[in-house]
Every structure is written in structure tokens, then in C-alpha cells.
Image (tube, rainbow, N blue to C red):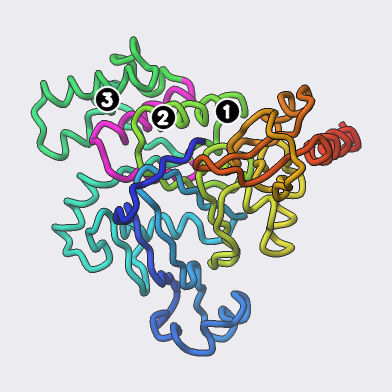
Amino acid sequence: MTKLNAEQGSPAALSVKSLWKVFGPKGDKIIGTPSADLPRSELLAKTGCVAAVRDVSFEVTPGEVFVVMGLSGSGKSTLVRCLTRLIEPTAGTVTIDGNDITNASDAKLRELRRNYVSMVFQHFGLLPHRQVLDNVAYGLEIRGVGKAERRAKATEIIELVGLKGNERSYPDQLSGGMQQRVGLARALAGDPSLLLFDEPFSALDPLIRRDMQNEVIRLQGDLQKTMVFITHDLQEALKLGDRILIMRDGEIVQIGTGAEIVANPADDYVRDFVSEVPRAHVLTLRYVMRDPRPDDSSEGPVMSPDTVVRQAARAALESDHVVRVVEDGKLVGIVDDDAILRIVVAEEHHSASVPA
């Protein structure tokens, strides 16, 4: 997905600082003690507590799609629920558009949830006795928006997510993919500044899942929303995310773009995650270019350092000259045929060696 850069100096759309969630008796007393550094199994045995989220800090810029991923039990779903205090954090702060979530009163928290944040869950949570139109309009109804206005807005969003003609259908008359579109439309109807997705497509069939991923990409191109997307699927993370946060046992292992993580995995855990990733589809020219030399040709294709290797391959291999990598009007690197072939051929060899 194309990164939507925030202006320099723009405040973070979401800021998370030193966030902890410890389940168990007197969990708050553990933070700052030697016990907090124990592995999860040892902490549980010693204290009866589980540190589901451990000292997590990150910021999300306006218009960014920020993906949090990890295996089951890594703490990613607990983390996303702490962002709006569906689960109360044990310590730390969460700020959304400058609003302090962690210290907000109950009344302020309700206002923030209604007006600033929407969530899309794996289980759609649709109201079975309400038609699509009124399911989509439900959040606006809770806000006190008049019937005519909320139905007009719901109709607009229903068309936006590709459900036009289904306004009067009931949820049980729709496929799983269409039900998730209703959930997505409901989240968008209130025009939130932040969208939170908690593994929304994991229960869908693979083809429907791919369609919904493409739908998110399309909508993001139109709406430029700030999104936090939870998934256990690296391919989904790479497809959707501007940046990816990888968690293990409640802690951050690595944060970076897909290309950064594939090119420079932080440890064996991440290296194992990315081992099956087709590198030519993820790595950019920034990771295969060399420094320019005086004898390099001044001719040849000109490309951005953020061009994906696979996209650059045809033009590079068909040219009689090296690829000149230019950023902000300055020549920053050179990519020759060998650099391209090392990635593309290695990928094809790997694919051929994997049993069907």
C-alpha cells in the first residue's frame, strides 16, 4: 500500500507510550520489579500473573496503515483493545488525536469512542433484526443523529463499500464477505479519525479474504484514514501495512516497513516469519542498489528507491544501461542486471524447490 506521508511536525494520530497489561492479582505491583523481566511462564509460576502487553511504545502518523502482527498469544488483540480501554491498561498512556485515552473520564471516553474511533472485528457483530441500512447507521443513531440524516449517510457509505442494492437485506441473507462489508461500512459511517481492525478477515474464505484486503486498499486510497490492523498473517501484513509491528510474548520484536523487515529481520523469530516471503515482491531498489561511480552511464531507466524489485525487473533487464535510482532529484544509487537477477532468480529457484 502506498504510504501517505504526514506533514513534517504533524502530531501523531495515535501515540502509545510504555503500555502494559498484566492480568492477575496485584498485576500493577509487578511493573518496575525484577519479576517484570521474567519469561511469561516463569512470571505466571511465581506471581500468578500474565503480562499480555509489556512496555509497548509506538506512534502512528495520520493516514498511515499500521499493522500489528504476531502468533496466537503474542498480545496483539489485547493491545488493540487497550487502545480504547475495552481492556483497561495496567500502566502507560494512549493518546488519539491529542486526546488522552488512559486518563479520560467515563463520559469523555464514551465521546471519544463514538466520535474518534471505530472498530472492525473478526465476528461481525451485526444486529440480526435490522436491515443493512440500519446496521450501518447504528453508530450515528447512538450519537443522536436524526433518522433522515443518518440513513442518507449510511446509503452513501453502503455504495462506497460495494453493497448498493442490499440496503433492505438482513445480515443472514448475506455471505460472510458481504457481512464484513456491512461491518466495515458501519465503522466508516461515523467518519472516525482512527479505524481499528482486529483480525477482521481471518474467518473468511481465502478468495473473499483477498477481495476484502483489496477493498481496504481501495478505500484507503479514497479516504486516507489512519488504521491499526491486527493480523497473524504476514502476507496480509505486507500487503496492507505501511509499517509493521511484530510482537512476541507481549513485547515488540521489530517495527519497520515490509521491505525493512524482510531485508533486515531483527532476530531468528522474525527471520523465520519472513523466510517464505517472495523477496522480489517486497524488497525495493533501496535494498539492492550500489553507490554511483564516475564511470556509470548517464543513460538508462530512472526509478525511485521505493520501487519494488519485481516491478523494476522488466525495464531493468530490457535496458542496455543500468537503472539510475533518483530521490528528490539526486542520484542515490545504481542497480545493474546482476542485482535484479540475484533476487528474481533466487526467488524462482526457491519456488521451484518447494514441494507442491
Question: Measuring 75% from the left and 40% from the top, which residue is drawn there?
Answer: 296
Question: 344 above or below 98?
Answer: above
Which residue in the structure is indicated by mark 1? Answer: 210
Amino acid bearing label 2 = Gly
Question: 138 above or below 73?
Answer: above
Q: Is residue 76 magenta?
A: no
Question: 313 above or below 236?
Answer: above
Disc 3 residue crowd, few under 14, some 14–19, many 20+, Cα 10 Å: some
Question: Measuring 62% from the left and 46% from the top, which residue is drawn there?
Answer: 332
Which residue in the structure is indicated by mark 2? Answer: 221
Which residue in the structure is indicated by mark 3? Answer: 130
Question: Measuring 42% from the left and 48% from the top, which residue is drawn there?
Answer: 228
Question: 326 above or below 129?
Answer: below
- Can residue 278 be seen here? no
- Would residue 179 be found to the left or right of residue 238 on screen? left
Identify the magenta region. 175-199
Label 1 to label 3: alpha-carbon separation: 28 Å
Query: Is label 1 or label 3 in front?
Result: 1
The tag on residue 114 is none
Q: Position of residue 150 (x, y in %)?
A: 16, 26
Q: Earlier in the sequence, mark 2 or mark 1?
A: 1
Label 2 to label 3: alpha-carbon separation: 30 Å
Amino acid bearing label 1 = Arg
Q: Residue furthest front?
A: 294
Residue 182: which quarter of the image?
top left
Q: How many marks?
A: 3
